[in-house]
Structure formats: C-alpha cells, structure tokens
Amino acid sequence: MVDLERIKDEARRLLKEGEVRGVIGYVQGPKGVWAVPALIQNPDDVDRLIWNPTCIHNLSLFVVEEKKDQARQKEPDKRPLAVVVKGCDSRAINVLLQEKFIEREEVILLGISCENSGVVDQKKLVSLLHGQKIEDIVYGDNGHIVVAINGERRVFAPDEVLADRCLECRANFPVISDYFFGEKIERESAPSFTQVEEIEKMRLEERRRFWEKEMARCLRCYACRSVCPMCYCAECVVDPISFAVEPTTSAEEKAKKIKWIEKSPLLSENFVYHLVRAIHLAGRCVDCGECERVCPEGIPIRLLNKKLEREALRLFNYVAGMDSQAPSLFSTFKETDPEDFIR
Amino acid sequence: MNSEHEPRIVAFLCKWCSSAGSDMAGVSRLEYPPNVIPITVMCSGSVSPLYILSAFNLGADGVLVSGCHPGDCHYIKGNMYARRRMALLKELLPYIGLEPERFQMSWVSAAEGLKFTQIIKEFVEQLKPLGPQTQLRRYL
Ligand code: SF4
Ligand code: SF4
Ligand code: FES
C-alpha cells in the first residue's frame, strides 16, 4: 500500500528546506471526491495532498506549463519542482528528458506505484453507480476499488472501473523517480492492442465510415492538444501563431503565409488535424489517456495513438518513455528497418 | 466516371537521385503519363509527413516520396530516417480508411529513368479504379 503520510513527509521536508520551489500533486477538488492537480508552495498546505483512484491527471503537463511560464519570467526561481508521478506520468517525464525539453535537475520525482490497480474511468464509475453521489473512494485489497455511497461500501474489481489504459498498462510503476512510494508489483495486464485490432479487422470502407463518424464530431477545441504533455510546441502547424496577420502585414505577405489546414471543423480538416497529431506523437505518446478523457465529444483519440504505438513496437521494437537516454524513435534508424513497402 | 478519372499524383523527389532520375527519363525520351506534379526536395529525409497530408488535403489522388537508394543518400542517411517515418504513415493512412495504394515510396537513382517511368505508370493504373481521393481533400 502506498503510504500517503510518507509522501507528505517528503514533500514537507523538501519545501521546508527550500530544496524545491513547489510540489505538484493531487488535492481534493471542488467536485466531491474527484482529485485535481495543485501546486503547493507552503509546507503548511502539504496536508492537502491526497492519493486515491481518482488521481487521474498526468501531472507532467504542469512541469511543461511551469517551464514555459519560467521562460517568460525575468528572474525565475531556479530551484527544482517536486512532482507526483504515476507510471504513465513518469514515462512522460522520460520523453521530456529525452527530448531535452527539461533537464533532470529541474524535477524531483515523487514516484507512486499503482501496484495492482490504477486510476478509475470516471465514465465507467458514473454509469455503474447510476450517477449517485460518491462520498469516498479508496484503494482496497488486490487492486480493488472501494467506493462509499449512501453510507454503504461498494467494492469493485479493477477491470470493472479502471481506465482502459490502466488495464492495459505494461509499467504500472514509475520508471524514473527520486522517491518511490508503494510496491513495484508486476501485474498482469490486458492485451494492449485489442481495440486497434478490431478496427484493423474492418473492411477499408467500414474503417473510413467509422472514423468519419468520429471525426465529424470534432469541434477542434484542441482540448486534446492542450492536455497533452507531449504537445509542448510553441507553435502548432494547425494554427500557426507566428504567421499571425498584423496591421502591417501586406496583402502579398498574407497570400504567402502557409496555412497547412483550415481552422474550421470540416471533416477533411479534422482528419488532417488528427493525423498530424497522431504522427507527431508517434514514439512520444505514453498512453496516459488524457486526450481522450478531456474530449467533450467522446472521440476515441487513443485508438489513433495506440495504432502508432503498436507499429513502433512491431516495426522498430520501440516503446515510448522507457529510457530517457535512448535515442527517440525518429532520431535514429537501423539498417534492418523494414522497407518492403518501398519500391 | 471512375474509369474516366485521371489521377493527380504529387511526387516529392529528392534533388540528387529521384529528381535526376525523372530528368533522365525525360532526356531519354521515355514516355510516361502526365499525371505527376513533381516537387523537388533536397532529400527524402526532409519530407515531413505533413507535406504528404497537405498534398492529399489540397487534392492529390496519390502521393509518392522518392529518394536515393540506401547508402546513396547525398546526406548519408536522410533516406534512412525517411524510411522510418514513412513506414508509420504508410500504416496510419489505411487505418483511417484511405486506400493503401494512394501513398507510395520508392528508391530511384539518377540513372533509373526507366524505373521512374514504370513506377508512375503503375501508380496511375492503380489509382484510376479508385477514383478521386475525397477523404482528406478540402472543400467537398
Ligand atoms: S478534444 Fe475532442 S473535440 Fe476537441 S479538438 Fe480534440 S478531438 Fe476534437
Ligand atoms: S497523446 Fe494523449 S495519451 Fe498520449 S501522451 Fe498525449 S495526452 Fe497522453
Ligand atoms: S539526397 Fe536523395 S534521399 Fe537523401
């Protein structure tokens, strides 16, 4: 079992001794039991930290946000940030290190093992409980999730309520950390690519119709991009800001500006957006599932990432985020890389 | 209508081999279908998947990326990086429903004018029965 008090003790010490400028962790949110991310800077606030099956967010996103924020400050506090990381979050940190977006000294990682459980899928839980108000939610034995509802305790097996990505997770403990809480339990995970294979089994036209139905709903709100720790580019090709039109921009310059895709959510443009997104995340997506979770339209975005995750594994034996020292998927090659598709 | 469709192919050809190969086809007076819009790039390794998606978006029925044979890249290994990237794109496009024939890659050396013409001929033949590419094409 993860001992929350030990996490708090470490966090408090780090803050008191001034070793870190803040601790990014989970606290209870305004909506009942659901955890929300928080930046804690005062040792007295450390008691607000929580750890339970609703600690869903990938906190490495806030490392990225903080880094960007620091770049805008005149005299940024150079001390590291302490961050609570689960397995998937730690893999995201590895990718950020691998790409040299952050340096190792910039973070102190409070790694938490999900042991034989994970975090819940809010939708699964809400539908199982028919929307009744959850009073408390904690880890039980053997990865079970214990929910208090109307003063009663209900116990759920992991595969009933955990997020799909947790059930399929192959490293449910931090792969990089400075402190490690809980036990490193190698547990059985569900086959990772079942849903991808289901799509592959469809005929081509069926696949097209399947995706058209999904893509047609995309609002291009870019929530999926905003929540992704790997989507840190200062400028995205789908809405280039540095090509912004200013009062002094001449008609000729305007005509020359590159517009890769239309901003309006047309079906074709949505397809291109999602393809660009998937490709740019190939070998970088750690399957934290955040993009899919925040999509207001319930578009199965993970299925695109998973497809490339599987191809990277199958064709290049590459898994994202396992090693911050290894070359990234696209910055290297092997003589033996497959080329049977090339004429 | 499909049989009448004249496909448009956007071909990203590296300057040192494939573009020279297409020139060779021209100088040797080899005939090939006029369906290709060639775009010379410095190296196949400089072709971003975004270029390919953009070509489809702007109306291409097929896209070809062609570079030097392994070992012959003017920049030593640009084509090896391209090979990885394109392998993933090649997998991704049919996954969302685009016909696999629509995106192709080849190695064509400066001397292989004939190979270039054959690739184009076959590409056009494969694309014709598929009709126009509409999935990624803007403004329908
Ligand atoms: S979060 Fe959903 S609706 Fe918004 S841009 Fe992403 S896929 Fe589209
Ligand atoms: S693409 Fe989605 S699942 Fe992958 S790292 Fe980004 S937010 Fe997480
Ligand atoms: S120069 Fe031809 S592929 Fe690199």
Image (tube, coloured by chain):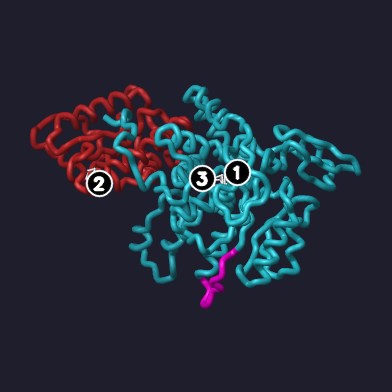
Chain colours: A cyan, B red
Horizontal and vertical percent position of residue B26: 12, 36
Cβ atoms at labels 1 and 2 below 8 Å apart: no
Residue at the spot of label 2:
B43
Q: Which kind of residue does numbered mark 1 sit on?
A: Gly
**Residue A76 forms part of the magenta stretch:** yes
Count neighbours of disc 2 (C-alpha within 10 A) and say few if under 14, some if 14 to 19, many if 20 or more. Answer: many
- The span picked out in magenta is A72-81
Question: Label 1, label 3: how many angstroms apart (C-alpha)?
Answer: 9 Å
Judge left or right: residue A58 versus residue B42.
right
For this rendering, which residue is in front, B53 or A341?
A341
Kindly indicate whether the residue at mark 3 contacts the one at mark 1 (C-beta within 8 angstroms): no
Find disc 3 in the rendering and name its residue.
Answer: A285
Distance from mark 1 CB to nearest ligand 2 atom below 8 Å: yes
Q: Is mark 2 within 8 Å of ligand 3?
A: yes
Q: Secondary structure at mark 2?
A: loop
Image quadrant where residue B110 sits: top left
Q: Nearer the viewer, residue A325 or A66?
A: A325
Judge whether residue A220 can be spotted in this image: no
Say which amino acid is labelled 2: Cys
| Residue that mark 1 sits on | A289
In front here: A271 or A286? Answer: A286
